[in-house]
Image: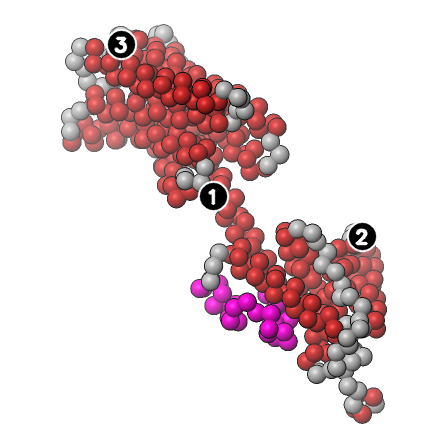
Amino acid sequence: MGNGAQAVGNVCMWAAVLLRLPHILESRRQRELWLAGFAAAAATTLDLDGVRDVVDRTFGGLHSVDLVRNVCGLVSSFALLEVVHSLTADARRRARLRWLRGTACCVVAGVVVLDMMHRPHGGQLILEDSSPTPSTAYWLLIIATHMTANVLCVMVCLSRGRQCTNGFLKTALFLLGSGAAMAGLYWLGALSQLLGHAWSVPVQPFALALHGLLVAAALSVPSIHTARRALTDLRDWWLIWPLWRDLVEVCPQVLLSPRRSRLQEILCPQGPGRLLLYRKLMEIRDAILLLDKYVTPELHASAQAFADRSGRRTRGSAAVSSSAKDHSAAVLAVVLKGARAACLAAACPRRSTIPIARIGADTLPDETAFLVEVSRIYRTAPTPVHPHTPVTEETAQ
């Protein structure tokens, strides 16, 4: 079970590493975290019994595999230390970074030298009933490096996580710190084995499995955030489409690109989702400005009355008071419906009219939410009789 759990954690870590590969050039911190995850994934892969058996049967070099595994583990630890270093604010950061990288080179070189100084041997193991291979100093250097990196990572992640206000960053720090704690538990078990205690042998594979899962989750947080934002943009784009369609039908001059069907936009988008949504918002705003000349005091009064009635119904049925933005959204929905009807009926626009209902937002996310609410009300709101519409004899009767 331990080997199976370790394999699952390893697969998840590789998936997260490959998922973040296209984004590692965005920032130095992203590159350092990705390198830590990549090196850790390589080290845990070479620690799997199945991989070791295949390499032994194919190449017959368990000694080289184990040395590469431990070097990859050290690279992962020092990359993690660089991540921890980048999370701290200090005037001496550059000097400490040079010292850290110099120490990393010395430790890796020291591990290789200690391995070469030992008599010829096969796999590198900490055995319960005999001395470790290659030497106790070799394993102490590796364990001390890993324990130092993991303890510092846990401390900094907890400290920065408590101060962070960004939910996704706080989650990533918590996951990274938890993964470092699991790796620390693994190396604590290795230290106990080195001291002659075997309590950690059944625990270590599960610690590595949890380490892989948590580090994979930490690496995936930016991708999850991006996917969530893309789905939110797609949902908002879908919800405002009916309002956009009706407005550009009477104001085609606001279109920034040729009009396409909803299915064409989804199957063959002409740009990222956020850009498509922003374009729809701009075209709706431009259409609102063009329809402003069809707004009359009577139409505005009718929209106000509808918004007041809707607010009273909401309070009575759901015991929820209608906010000012909900009221503004209801007014704007009815005003747009009446102005559009007047435009379609070829009514004479008024040059001197009251301003159309204001957009109830100051930021792009708030404006998007506001227009989504306008679109929802627009679909079911009644079409008021516009005073500009010519009155025929049938209408008068």
Circle 1 packing at 10 Å, graded few (<14), some (14-19), many (20+), is some
Numbered disc in front, either 1 or 2: 1
Q: Is residue 212 magenta?
A: no
Q: Is residue 244 magenta?
A: yes
Work out whether mark 2 precedes mark 3 in sequence or the reverse, and give the earlier one: 3
Picture mark count: 3
For the point 68% across and 71% down, the residue is 290
Name the amino acid, label 3: Ser
Q: Nearer the viewer, residue 40 or 210?
A: 40
Residue topped by disc 1: 223
Q: CA distance from mark 2 to mark 3?
A: 73 Å
Q: Secondary structure at mark 1?
A: helix
Residue topped by disc 3: 135
Work out whether mark 1 precedes mark 2 in sequence or the reverse, and give the earlier one: 1
* Residue 158, visible in the rendered structure: no
- Bounds of the magenta segment: 241-269
The quadrant of the image that shows the C terminus is: bottom right
Residue topped by disc 2: 321
Work out whether mark 3 precedes mark 1 in sequence or the reverse, and give the earlier one: 3
Q: CA distance from mark 1 to mark 2?
A: 37 Å
For the point 65% across and 59% down, the residue is 372
Instruction: Say how the picture is coloured.
Output: secondary structure
For the point 34% across and 11% down, the residue is 140
Name the amino acid, label 1: Ser
The image position of residue 224, as x and y in percent, is 49, 44
- Say if 330 sits above or below 15 in the image: below
Name the amino acid, label 2: Ser
The quadrant of the image that shows the N terminus is: top left
